[in-house]
Amino acid sequence: MTKPQKNAQLKAKEQSKAIFTLSDPVQFLALGFGSGLAPKAPGTFGTLAAIPLFYLMSDLSVITYAAIVLFLAVIGIYICGKGAKHMGVHDHPAIVWDEIVGYLITMFMIPWSWHSVLVGFILFRIFDIFKPWPISYLDKHCHGGFGIMIDDIAAGIASLVCMHLIYFA
């Protein structure tokens, strides 16, 4: 067995030992209201959990929307860091608060429509999954709650730029 295969096997073993407690408010939020517990593609389900939040926020003023997203991102550092520590695994796939914030960044100043929701969803998932530079750099070199959040914030910003080019260029 090669070293990367051993590392992947060890990581999977660590993740399988994680303990989830939805009654704990921090874990409930870190797990994206439970959406991160999906057995397959938890990041995708976490992003889906952000859609109703975007709907509720879509009529807010630009300043209010930005302030809420900034607040969610800042507390996300604590939520994700504490959630990871409690689970005993850095950036466990079930931690999806970062996906929720990343999607809300993607949709900043974008009018609500099913088309925009779908395009934003696809763009954010592409940037989050494939992690082109500098997202990949941030993912590999930043740790703790900040590290969990920053690559999805960067993916959200990259998706936001694409959304604005699509809708306003």
Image (cartoon, rainbow, N blue to C red):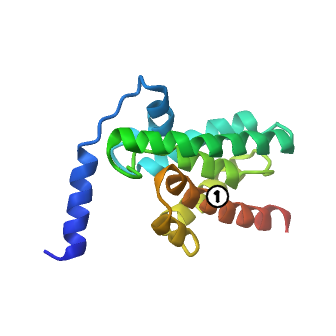
* 134 is higher (above) or lower (below) than 156: below
Q: At 66% from the left edge and 62% from the top edge, which residue is drawn? A: 159
Indicate the quadrant containing the N terminus: top left, top right, bottom left or bottom right. Answer: bottom left
* 147 is higher (above) or lower (below) than 74: below
Front in this rendered view, residue 117 or 131: 131
Q: Quadrant of residue 24?
A: top left
Q: How many marks?
A: 1
* 154 is higher (above) or lower (below) than 45: below
| Rendering coords of residue 167 (x, y %) | 80, 61
Q: Left or right: where does residue 95 sit relative to residue 6? A: right
Q: Is residue 85 visible?
A: yes
Q: Left or right: where does residue 31 sit relative to residue 162? A: left
Q: At 41% from the left edge and 22% from the top edge, which residue is drawn? A: 23
| Rendering coords of residue 46 (x, y %) | 50, 44
Q: Residues within 10 Å of mark 1 (few under 14, many from 20)?
A: many
Q: Secondary structure at mark 1?
A: helix
| Rendering coords of residue 126 (x, y %) | 54, 64
| Rendering coords of residue 133 (x, y %) | 56, 75
As drawn, the residue found furthest toward the left would be: 1
As drawn, the residue found furthest toward the top would be: 23
Q: Quadrant of residue 9?
A: bottom left
Q: At 26% from the left edge and 58% from the top edge, which residue is drawn? A: 11
Q: Is residue 115 visible?
A: no
Which residue lies under the disc numbered 1? Answer: 156
Front in this rendered view, residue 52 or 113: 52
Indicate the quadrant containing the C terminus: top left, top right, bottom left or bottom right. Answer: bottom right
Q: At 68% from the left edge and 55% from the top edge, which residue is drawn? A: 106
The kind of residue tagged 1 is Gly
Q: Left or right: where does residue 69 sit relative to residue 3? A: right
